[in-house]
Amino acid sequence: MAEAIFITSETPEIIIEMVDGNLRLSGWERNEFQAESEGGDDLRAEHKDNRVVVKCYAHCTMRVPRRSSLTIKRVNGDARLKSLDQAAVIENVGGDLVLRQTAALTINNVGGDLSAKIVEGAFTVKFVGGDLSVRGVAGDFSSDKVGGDLNLREANASAVARGVGADTRLDLNFWPGKEYSFQSGADIICRLPLEASARFEIQSGGDINVSAPNAKVDGNAHRKSVTLGDGAAPVAMRAGGDVSITTLSGERDSTGEDLGGMTDELSAHIETQLSEHMASLEKDLTERLGKLDSILGGKFVNAEEIAAKARRAAEKIAKAETRRAEKIARVEIRRGEKAQRRAESAERRAERRAERGKFGWSIDLGRAFAAPRPPTPPKPPGPSSDPVSDEERMVILRMVEQGKISVEEAEKLLTALEGKEK
């Protein structure tokens, strides 16, 4: 194992020239840079004039001050970044890229999938070879080319996706004065709140389906203008497949909160708190071992070696706790998505019944002139199934945490307890 530790300012410039493996980087509250590689002599790091330049020829773990100015030139494997309060530039990642709780991001190339949650600034990406999933962007969003699917949620400014190879899924508020434009090689599925005010100009190679209250629809089968509310936000859509526009209904609880967003924020909060707590414990341990080392003259204890072992143990604990939190979050997110799909299916069935009633009626003359019959009394409601108690839910989630059951098994068990199993 190779290690590099530098005392820095609160806002150093960090330049990662190359990581020939996977990179795991997180920001912390200390004015200190730390890097650790899995190889014996694979890490090169220089610190001069508030700038740290790093090369690593193996998998690498780094901790940097949260307000660092970060540039990553090349990572040949996967990369995971979290807890960064200043804008970052990422030029090339050969594998997958995962981003959690960052400031503005400019990304040139990602060979695999890209997942980002809670971006406190603009998000700009040129090329993603796989899927792109982004949730919670405070600034403008733009992507030039996505090889797979695009899943965009909670973008709070302009949003432009110029070339999506597969499906595009949008769960957005459309804000007046912002730009919205989406081009997809397959389907576009757009969900928006009931109070949305937007005007959609849609071109589609397939069907265009609009299921939104009080929507004004003009055009033909493959080209339509759809106005919701006052039409304050202009939205352009072009799809090779179908386009579907619906209103959000099934993913919010009785208080109006987005359950998926709540679980995402909970997972990110737990991850950040664990990281900061482990960093504090490590700092305290290092100081104590340093004093002990000075007292014993280095004869019986090696403070640096013990501190390094403690840091690795703390990281393992933090990773395990984060995985448990993410499993719990996924259970709730998937259940919310299933509820959304059930609500949409029920809405489509109601629309079809309404259409049949409107255009497929007929008159039975015998019944029309028969004596009227008294109305049939309503049937008493059948016994409703008891909802899942909080205790039962916590037992199931603990079983997921402990690895006794999978996320899919937990979903089936919750569904069975609710009496909804088909």
Image (spheres, helix red, strand yellow):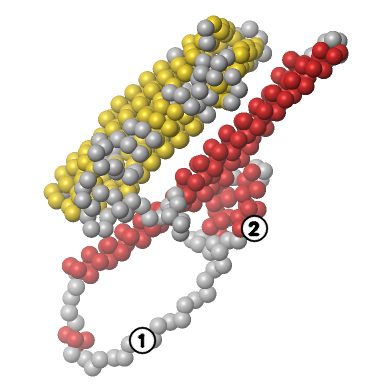
**Number of callouts:** 2
Task: State how far apart marks 1 and 2 are (Cα).
Answer: 42 Å
The residue closer to the viewer here, 391 or 284, is 284
Q: Amino acid at mark 1?
A: Thr
Q: Is residue 100 visible?
A: yes
Q: Amino acid at mark 2?
A: Glu
Label 2 packing within 10 angstroms: few (<14), some (14-19), many (20+): few
Question: Where the N terminus falls, by quadrant?
Answer: top right
Q: Which mark is residue 376?
A: 1
Q: Which mark is residue 391?
A: 2
**Where residue 311 sits in the image (x, y, percent)?**
69, 23
Q: Tag 2, which secondary structure? A: helix
Question: Image point 13% across, 49% down: which residue?
Answer: 219
User: Which callout, 1 or 2, points to the residue nearer the camera?
Assistant: 2
Left or right: residue 264 compared with residue 294: left
Q: Is residue 325 above or below residue 307?
A: below
Left or right: residue 310 compared with residue 292: left
Left or right: residue 130 compared with residue 335: left
Question: Image point 16% across, 85% down: which residue?
Answer: 365
Q: Tag 1, which secondary structure? A: loop
